[in-house]
Image (spheres, rainbow, N blue to C red):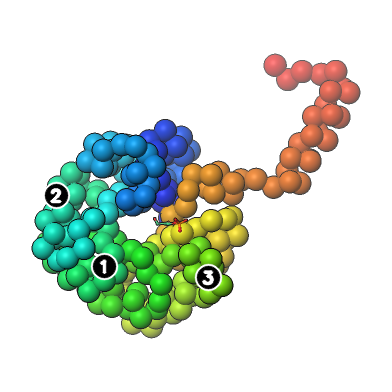
């Protein structure tokens, strides 16, 4: 399973990238706003830092504007994936951009049927939002499972990029149901290494080691 980092914070991306944890990056208008950076500048910087796909989202809501913005974002670097919302205009934009050879990430997916039409439109990635479904008492993970089944039934090549991931459990469940990619905030990715028994065990080893009076170096 690939790990994308869901942030536009360069330092956080660089730290995880140095550890080999970054197969790509996803951004959205809210994350650009949080970073306080210019979208063009920060997107170029991220794309130069990481080898994998970097999603940059259009903000126009009708086809002509989305297409123009998508082409501009795609021209920033070879590893840009243009992110478009799962609307009819977004799907039209996806179709054209993928036909031109660009990677397209179709975002704001909340149903299996939406994932189906995105795959038909040539999406490179589909981004189902787990956390936001859970927020309204629906089952985000069931959606990932359903899309996996549908894509496998018909051999769609679109990758399932599980988004709106809020916890380590989300990551583990995505791996179990076969999401191709997860995108998560840096804190969630760092949290995957944590376990209270690891901390407790390490404290006990250190306490015993101190009693030996020995040193390794
Ligand atoms: O990139 C989209 C995304 O992952 C949103 O997450 O937590 O704002 O629902 P969240």
> Real-space Cα distance between discs 2 and 3?
35 Å
Q: Earlier in the sequence, mark 2 or mark 3?
A: 2
Camera-side mark, 1 or 2:
2
In the rendered structure, the answer to whether residue 91 lies left or right of residue 100 reads: right
Which mark, residue 72? 2
Where does the image place residue 85, in percent across and percent down from the top left?
A: 28, 64
Q: Mark 3 Cα within 10 Å, few/some/many (few <14, many 20+)?
A: few
Residue at 52% from the left image edge and 70% from the top image edge? 136
Q: Which residue, given by chain and number where applicable, does mark 1 sit on?
A: 123
Which mark, residue 10? none
Residue at 34% from the left image edge and 37% from the top image edge? 36
Q: Mark 2 Cα within 10 Å, few/some/many (few <14, many 20+)?
A: some
Residue at 53% from the left image edge and 44% from the top image edge? 187
Regarding residue 25, the answer to whether it shows in the image is no
Which structural element holds mark 2? helix
Above or below, comparing residue 174 to residue 19 in the picture: below
Which structural element holds mark 3? loop
In the rendered structure, the answer to whether residue 197 lies left or right of residue 45 reads: right
Which mark, residue 136? 3
Q: Residue furthest right?
A: 211
> Real-space Cα distance between discs 1 and 3?
27 Å
Looking at the image, how many numbered discs can be counted on the residues? 3
Where does the image place residue 6, in percent across and percent down from the top left?
A: 41, 49
Q: Quadrant of ligand 1?
A: bottom left
Asked if the residue at label 3 sits under 8 Å from ligand 1, the reply is: no
């Amino acid at each position: 399973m690939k790990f994308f980092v869901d942030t536009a914070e360069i330092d956080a991306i660089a730290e995880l990238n140095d550890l080999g944890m970054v197969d790509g990056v996803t951004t959205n208008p809210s994350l650009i706003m949080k970073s306080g950076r210019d979208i063009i500048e920060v997107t170029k910087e991220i794309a130069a830092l990481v080898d994998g796909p970097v999603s940059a989202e259009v903000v126009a809501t009708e086809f002509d504007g989305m297409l123009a913005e998508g082409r501009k974002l795609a021209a920033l670097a070879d590893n840009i994936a243009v992110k478009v919302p799962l609307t009819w205009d977004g799907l039209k934009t996806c179709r054209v951009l993928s036909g031109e050879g660009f990677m397209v990430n179709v975002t704001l997916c909340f149903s299996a049927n939406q994932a189906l039409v995105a795959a038909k439109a040539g999406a490179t990635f589909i981004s189902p939002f787990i956390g936001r479904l859970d927020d309204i008492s629906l089952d985000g993970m069931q959606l990932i499972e359903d899309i996996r089944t549908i894509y496998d039934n018909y051999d769609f090549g679109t990758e399932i990029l599980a988004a709106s991931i809020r916890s380590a459990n989300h990551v583990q469940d995505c791996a179990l149901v076969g999401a191709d990619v997860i995108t998560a905030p840096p804190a969630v990715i760092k949290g995957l290494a944590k376990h209270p028994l690891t901390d407790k065990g390490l404290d006990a080893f250190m306490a015993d080691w101190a009693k030996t009076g020995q040193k390794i170096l």
